[in-house]
Image (cartoon, rainbow, N blue to C red):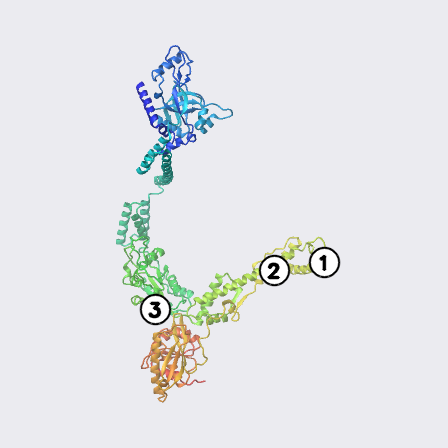
């Protein structure tokens, strides 16, 4: 035992002589950086918290028999006062520790403050240490086989809490509070904050322990323990001047400290983040385990699989076998994938789409023709040809027992109700309705879907439609199909072929799903403004139904029966508050909404009702303010009917008379109001205030009815937009009215020719009016045909050979092009050459060949409506268009004298005959 203790003493002495400060400071700090531990020990007493290192020596009894006191370090040793017991104690102690004083074998130990009572040699004492740094230092001493500390009692101070204040003392201040003599104590065990000590010998404090550093050694020590590179360390080694060496070392130390601070901050942030994530992960896992144990929830994969199987279970017999096989394979794949992998999300989304489709789920169709007729009449006025085709489709479906998917294309100008017709068809058939527009669509993936390998991949519009409606036989409205785009991502018009072709869409293949889908039961309804803009392969698969537009009578009925009622209810106006006369509606249609559709008409009616709503609100607010002022005047009347005087005195008689007049007027008003409102009179007699509330009946009586007539129509919708198409009451020579078709419907236009210059051989034709290439060619053909006819009718007339003629089509800002103005140009040229005007109220249309044959034209209904709107009585059509005219409704053909011609000679006879008047 003595040998081991002697070895440990020498070991401790050698360690203190080489790096005493480093060894001791490691026991007093928590930092893991050696440099910081040394610097903390060198910063002074501020970093010593209840842990002070002291040089202490044993105070052992002398082995001499005379009992004289021995001297240690120049001071007297405490004399034994216990007699034999003390001698026995010294003998036993001397058997463990040497009694001869040798400073080189002395320990350098921690000074441990004892707040309550001292520790005696040979006795145990448990001490509670709250300072973590001191605990760490004691544990470090125990681990290094030097489990000793000096236990010193703390001096008491007046009016102070010793245990509380001792933790706040550091350095020299703590040294002054400790008694000089203490006990060398062995650290037997450390459990938490409890340290068990056993006393060995008395101990005296001789000096404060800081170390035997000097400036050169301090500089070398700092450079040695720093993390600087070899060149920087060599620079310190080569520097002989101590001050410069200290400065170089200081720079290295500062860098080391900053790096340590940054590392500590980063480590703390990472530790907090990891701790938070770990805590969240552990809590989630515990929650899952608890729910799974209670049967409340299974894991993610099992729950997803159960959800997907639950979706397909009701329609499992209707799902194609190849689709079921793909679903089962994907479900098996889902169980093998990790939930955190990207492939797991791809497979989950694929199964989500695949199981959400309505495989074999069809809605029950209604083939009641009478019911369909009622719905179509409720939603739309007129359009008899469109309704007839829809009823035919329903009748065929009733006879067959099922309806086959068809492709119907509704073509016509904007605002005629193409989209709303599709919605009405779906309601009549009891089919789900889905609409998507393909105007400007340039990506094939919008129709055919994306490949699943792409990020953000989605199926095409049809798969989205089926998932949205939940049935496999919806009515799909493809809007603006004539405006399909074409970009770098392919040709959508070609991709639409597989979607719309009845021979192919039974096995439509979407790129995302990659399994065939049956679209043969889907009813496709397409809308277009101009059929010619639809690609021919796509147009070949459609059944085109033209919607020409509405005449004035039809617009009147639509406005009165549909638009006005809907707009009035949307604006919150009651029928008894507004009257919109027929004359105002007619003026609105003729002067503001002359286009083929009724969308602009609806906008104008909404504009009228918005202004009426504002007017009614303003009138109501004015009436409420007047009623409130009357009520305020009534409040000034007391129970006897006299006016309450607000001022203390009445200074003159004029004021008194004025008050009396007010009382008389108020009394008369009260008499009238009492006759109308007895309850109000009773309230006054009771002396209570009159109420200012007015019921709805009174307010309706106060607000006058707003009447919109032709005279005040401009106050609501502004100045007229259109004027009469007829520029001339009777066309002069050289002017003929023609009929044209536009995307907005039909319109009338004049062909004007005039004589510019006369001279031998100066025959020429000048064209203006922003004409297209087709109309320019028609003008050249018309000049040739007109010269031949003039030569035949009047051989002596050399007008075309010797005259320069200017042909103009008014509205030069509007581009014009088309092949149907040939006969009109010929008639205009002949009228100028013969100086003879055409028949009054005549309009014509048709293309002419060089031999004078009249070719058929398009837009018969639109042109007929335009002619009737302009007050035309006689119309000339090509004979080939007789069938188109016969299909028009009777109200469109009413009051018109229509002639169908095959050769221009027939037009000549009709145009230049003398009028009966």
Q: Is residue 221 above or below residue 355?
A: above
CA–CA distance between discs 1 and 2?
Answer: 26 Å
Q: Are marks 3 and 2 in contact (CB under 8 Å)?
A: no
- Of all residues shown, which one is farthest toward the front? 241
Residue underneath mark 1: 656
Is 81 left, or right, of 223 in this rendering? right
Q: Element at badge 1?
A: helix
For mark 2, does the 10 Å Cα neighbourhood hold few (<14), some (14 to 19), or many (20 or more) residues? few
Q: Element at badge 2?
A: helix
Residue underneath mark 2: 626
Residue 376: % across, % down? 40, 65
Q: Nearer the viewer, residue 758 or 232?
A: 232
Q: Nearer the viewer, residue 257 or 817?
A: 257
Residue underneath mark 3: 531
For mark 1, does the 10 Å Cα neighbourhood hold few (<14), some (14 to 19), or many (20 or more) residues? few
- Does residue 778 appear in the picture of this structure? yes
- Of all residues shown, which one is farthest toward the bottom? 796
Please state, as top left, top right, bottom left or bottom right, where the C terminus lies in the image. Answer: bottom left
Disc on the earlier residue, 1 or 3: 3
Please state, as top left, top right, bottom left or bottom right, where the N terminus lies in the image. Answer: top left
Residue 258: % across, % down? 38, 38
């Amino acid at each position: 035992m003595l040998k081991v203790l002697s070895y440990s003493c020498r070991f401790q002495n050698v360690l203190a002589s080489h790096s005493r400060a480093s060894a001791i400071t490691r026991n007093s700090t928590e930092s893991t950086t050696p440099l910081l531990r040394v610097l903390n020990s060198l910063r002074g007493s501020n970093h010593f918290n209840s842990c002070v290192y002291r040089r202490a020596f044993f105070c052992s009894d002398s082995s001499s028999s005379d009992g004289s006191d021995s001297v240690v370090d120049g001071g007297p040793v405490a004399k034994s006062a216990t007699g034999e017991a003390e001698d026995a104690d010294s003998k036993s102690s001397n058997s463990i520790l040497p009694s001869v004083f040798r400073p080189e074998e002395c320990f350098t130990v921690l000074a441990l403050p004892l707040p309550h009572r001292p520790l005696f040699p040979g006795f145990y004492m448990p001490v509670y240490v709250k300072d973590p740094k001191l605990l760490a230092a004691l544990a470090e001493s125990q681990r290094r086989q030097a489990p000793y500390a000096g236990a010193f009692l703390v001096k008491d101070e007046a009016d102070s809490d010793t245990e509380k204040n001792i933790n706040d003392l550091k350095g020299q201040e703590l040294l002054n509070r400790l008694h000089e003599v203490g006990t060398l104590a062995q650290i037997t065990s450390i459990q938490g904050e409890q340290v068990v000590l056993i006393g060995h010998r008395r101990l005296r404090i001789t000096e404060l322990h800081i170390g035997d550093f000097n400036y050169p050694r301090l500089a070398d020590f700092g450079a040695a323990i720093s993390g600087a590179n070899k060149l920087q360390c060599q620079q310190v080694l080569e520097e002989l001047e101590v001050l410069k060496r200290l400065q170089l070392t200081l720079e290295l130390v500062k860098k080391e400290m900053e790096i340590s601070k940054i590392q500590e901050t980063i480590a703390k942030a990472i530790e907090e983040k990891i701790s938070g994530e770990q805590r969240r992960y552990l809590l989630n896992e515990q929650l899952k385990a608890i729910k799974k144990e209670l049967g409340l929830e299974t894991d993610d994969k099992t729950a997803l699989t159960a959800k997907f199987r639950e979706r397909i279970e009701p329609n499992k017999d209707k799902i194609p076998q190849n689709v079921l096989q793909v679903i089962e394979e994907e479900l098996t794949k889902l169980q093998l994938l990790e939930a955190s992998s990207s492939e797991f999300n791809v497979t989950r989304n694929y199964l989500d789409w695949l199981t959400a489709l309505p495989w074999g789920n069809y809605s029950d169709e209604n083939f009641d023709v009478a019911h369909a007729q009622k719905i179509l009449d409720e939603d739309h006025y007129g359009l008899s040809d469109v309704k007839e085709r829809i009823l035919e489709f329903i009748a065929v479906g009733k006879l067959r027992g099922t309806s086959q998917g068809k492709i119907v294309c509704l073509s016509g100008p904007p605002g005629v109700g193409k989209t709303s017709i599709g919605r009405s068809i779906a309601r009549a058939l009891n089919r789900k309705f889905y609409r998507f527009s393909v105007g400007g669509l340039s990506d094939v993936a919008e129709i055919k879907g994306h490949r699943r390998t792409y990020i953000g991949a989605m199926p095409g519009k049809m798969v989205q439609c089926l998932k949205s409606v939940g049935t496999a036989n919806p009515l799909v409205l493809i809007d603006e199909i004539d405006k399909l785009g074409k970009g770098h991502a392919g040709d959508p018009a070609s991709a639409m072929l597989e979607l719309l072709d009845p021979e192919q869409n039974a096995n439509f293949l979407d790129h995302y799903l990659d399994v065939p889908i049956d679209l043969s039961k889907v009813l496709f309804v397409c809308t277009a403004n101009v059929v010619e803009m639809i690609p021919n392969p796509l147009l070949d698969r459609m059944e085109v139904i033209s919607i020409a537009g509405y005449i004035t009578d039809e617009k009147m009925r639509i406005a009165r029966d549909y638009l006005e009622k809907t707009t009035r209810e949307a604006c919150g106006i009651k029928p008894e508050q507004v009257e919109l006369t027929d004359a105002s509606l007619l003026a609105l249609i003729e002067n503001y909404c002359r286009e083929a559709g009724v969308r602009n008409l609806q906008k104008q009616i909404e504009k009228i009702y918005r202004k009426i709503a504002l007017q009614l609100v303003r009138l109501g607010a004015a009436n409420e303010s007047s009623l409130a002022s009357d009520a305020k005047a009534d409040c000034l009347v007391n129970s006897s009917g006299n006016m309450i005087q607000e001022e203390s005195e009445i200074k003159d008689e004029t004021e008194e008379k004025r008050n009396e007049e007010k009382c008389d007027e108020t009394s008369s008003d009260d008499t009238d109001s009492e006759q109308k409102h007895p309850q109000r009179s009773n309230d006054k007699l009771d002396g209570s205030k009159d109420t200012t509330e007015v019921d709805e009946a009174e307010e309706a009586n106060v607000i006058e009815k707003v009447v919109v007539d032709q005279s005040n129509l401009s106050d609501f919708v502004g100045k007229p937009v259109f004027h009469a198409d007829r520029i001339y009451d009777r066309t002069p020579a050289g002017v003929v009215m023609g009929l044209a078709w536009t995307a907005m419907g039909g319109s009338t236009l004049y062909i004007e020719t005039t004589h510019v210059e006369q001279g031998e051989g100066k025959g020429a034709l000048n064209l203006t009016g922003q004409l297209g290439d087709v109309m320019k060619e028609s003008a050249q053909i018309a000049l040739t045909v007109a010269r031949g006819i003039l030569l035949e009718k009047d051989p002596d007339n050399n007008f075309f050979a010797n005259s320069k003629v200017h042909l103009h089509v008014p509205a030069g800002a509007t581009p014009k092009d088309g092949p149907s103005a040939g006969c009109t140009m010929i008639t205009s040229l002949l009228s100028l050459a013969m100086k003879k005007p055409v028949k009054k109220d005549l309009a014509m249309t048709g293309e002419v060949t060089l031999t004078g044959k009249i070719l058929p034209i398009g837009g018969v209904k639109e042109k007929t409506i335009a002619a009737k709107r302009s007050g035309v009585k006689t119309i000339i059509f090509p004979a080939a268009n007789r069938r188109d005219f016969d299909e028009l409704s009777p109200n469109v053909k009413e009051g018109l004298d229509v002639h169908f011609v095959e050769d221009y000679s027939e037009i000549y006879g009709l145009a230049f005959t003398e009028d009966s008047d």
